[in-house]
């Protein structure tokens, strides 16, 4: 974890919000647990959810994969809140891909979702459609890089999932850079991004990731000289367990820093307060309203 360069939008899929445009990668097999988390989060938020799986993957197979991670999806499908589609169907009746046609259809689908009283639209696109439609890869990369207008002030979010075996490394690097957000590979992960005087912890801090959690915090504390200040950014954590929250306070108790600023959401702040962080005067909680 240490040494990874911080990206401006690395986040767990559960933290995706309206207006997010995210890149994810997988090897050979789609990360169905990630797709399921994306779908269920959208259903919970009252959004309409559109899933475009690999072109040769049928709806029943996709549903079976998703239902491994949650309840049956019959109700969401029957009322139209969840739809399994494809880029080919989305672009119809246009005979070929153009970014302009894709953008037009996304705007239409978003407007239709709002007209049907959903809070917005979220879409999962498996990018195997590029070869399926014989689309020009450079045109696709350019479309990804210039799609910001779809997400600005619009109730729309999108995940673009790239199979690393189907695209050249240079293409993957280009499309990753084109997306404002980069997703963790799967739910249940923890990643630490270290910069001078700061550590950002992303994902889930629980029993399964506690060893990595402690290692990241200890490294962050040792990087800052005694008497200095440290920022511990938890704003992109999806889950913080009582045990991991206690670890943070225990390490802070023994630290010789003048100020430890913890950036977090209100639920995390409530947990730390209940655990007694207010007795540690050098800890300052800063709630991130955008987290």
Image (cartoon, rainbow, N blue to C red):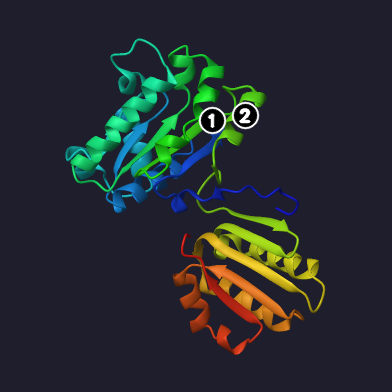
The relative height of residue 258 versus residue 25 in the rendered view (above or below) is below
Residue that appears at 30% across and 53% down: 44
Residue that appears at 40% across and 29% down: 53
User: Is 125 situated left or right of 209 in this image?
Assistant: left
Residue that appears at 67% across and 50% down: 6
Within 10 Å of disc 2 (Cα), the crowding (few <14, some 14-19, many 20+) is some
Residue at label 1?
A: 145
Q: In which quadrant of the rendered view does residue 107 lie?
A: top left
Task: Give the number of the mark in front: 2 or 1.
Answer: 1
Would you say residue 56 is visible in this rendering? no
Of 121 and 35, nearer the camera is 121
Residue at label 2?
A: 174
The image position of residue 227, as x and y in percent, is 79, 79
User: Is 105 situated left or right of 226 in this image?
Assistant: left
The image position of residue 254, as x and y in percent, is 73, 82
The image position of residue 193, as x and y in percent, is 67, 55
């Amino acid at each position: 974890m240490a040494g990874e360069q911080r990206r401006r939008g690395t986040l767990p899929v559960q933290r995706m919000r309206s207006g997010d445009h995210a890149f994810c990668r997988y090897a050979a097999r789609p990360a169905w647990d990630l797709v399921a988390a994306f779908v269920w989060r959208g259903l919970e938020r009252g959004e309409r959810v559109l899933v475009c799986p690999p072109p040769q993957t049928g709806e029943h197979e996709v549903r079976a994969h998703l239902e491994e991670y949650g309840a049956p999806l019959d109700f969401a499908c029957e009322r139209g809140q969840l739809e399994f589609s494809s880029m080919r169907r989305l672009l119809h009746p246009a005979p070929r891909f153009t970014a302009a046609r894709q953008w037009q259809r996304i705007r239409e689908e978003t407007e239709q979702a709002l007209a049907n009283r959903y809070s917005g639209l979220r879409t999962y696109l498996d990018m195997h459609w590029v070869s399926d439609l014989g689309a020009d890869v450079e045109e696709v990369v350019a479309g990804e890089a210039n799609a910001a207008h779809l997400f600005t002030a619009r109730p729309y979010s999108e995940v673009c999932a790239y199979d690393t075996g189907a695209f050249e490394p240079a293409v993957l690097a280009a499309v990753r850079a084109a997306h404002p957000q980069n997703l963790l590979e799967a739910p249940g992960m923890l990643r630490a991004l270290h910069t001078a005087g700061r550590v950002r912890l992303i994902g889930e801090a629980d029993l399964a990731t506690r060893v990595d959690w402690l290692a990241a915090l200890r490294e962050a504390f040792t990087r800052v000289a005694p008497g200095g200040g440290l920022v511990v950014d938890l704003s992109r954590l999806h889950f913080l367990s009582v045990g991991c929250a206690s670890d943070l306070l225990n390490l802070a108790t023994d630290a010789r820093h003048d100020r430890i600023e913890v950036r977090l959401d209100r639920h995390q702040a409530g947990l730390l307060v209940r655990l007694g962080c207010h007795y540690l005067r050098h800890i300052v909680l800063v709630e991130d309203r955008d987290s």
